[in-house]
Image (cartoon, rainbow, N blue to C red):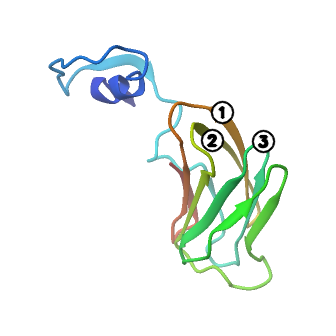
Amino acid sequence: MKLPLAAAALCFATLLPTAVLPISAERSFGFEVAQSAAEAIGKINPNRPVQIEVVNAGDAPITCMLTQPASAERRVPPGGKTTFGSTRTNYLPLPINFLAYPDRDNIGISSYVFVEGNVVKIVIGEQISQISGDISLNINEDGSIFLF
């Protein structure tokens, strides 16, 4: 998939001086995007219970929660972890939407997702950024896992 010029311009906006330029939506750069939101990063068995483990591998506290099914926010300190669901009971119905974000400004977060059976492990790190970032992970009704 080619990255449209408008999307690439947005990515590099903090590096360039502010200017208004006409941008053609048909133009694209000659490089490939490693992963897009249209590509599943993993899959679970939708007929079995699912568990989501979250590990904060960074130095900044993060907050995470499920937006579907709704859950309370959970603050995870550096080096801490939390778990949603269990592989022994059908506590989490599909689809599942997970959200994580830093508790402080100017902190971006990155993630590594590992799937083993029906356990989805999300290891979250931090990176210095001019704007705060977040992570959204979705597990569809067919068990496909997407990271945004």
Q: Residues within 10 Å of mark 3 (few under 14, many from 20)?
A: few
Query: Which kind of residue does numbered mark 2 sit on?
Result: Ile
Q: Which mark is residue 44?
A: none
Task: Report if the CB atoms under discs 2 and 1 are less than 8 Å apart.
Answer: yes
Q: Residue furthest right?
A: 79
For residue 75, what is the image quadrant?
Answer: bottom right
Residue at screen point 52% across, 37% down: 35
Tell me which numbered mark, 2 or 3, is placed earlier along the sequence.
3
**Disc sitting over residue 127 in the figure:** 1
Q: Which residue is pictured at 17% across the width and 23% down the height? A: 24
Q: Which numbered circle lies on residue 109?
A: 2
Residue 144 sits in quarter: bottom right
Tell which of 46 and 138 is nearer to you: 138
State whether residue 122 is above or below residue 44: above
x, y percent for residue 36: 47, 40
Mark 2 vs mark 3: in front:
3
SS label for mark 3: loop
User: In front here: 114 or 78?
Assistant: 78
The residue under label 3 is which amino acid type?
Asp
Which residue is labeled 3 in the image?
Answer: 59
Dot 1 alpha-carbon crowd within 10 angstroms: few under 14, some 14 to 19, many 20 or more = some
Q: Residue at x 66, y 64 (%)?
A: 44
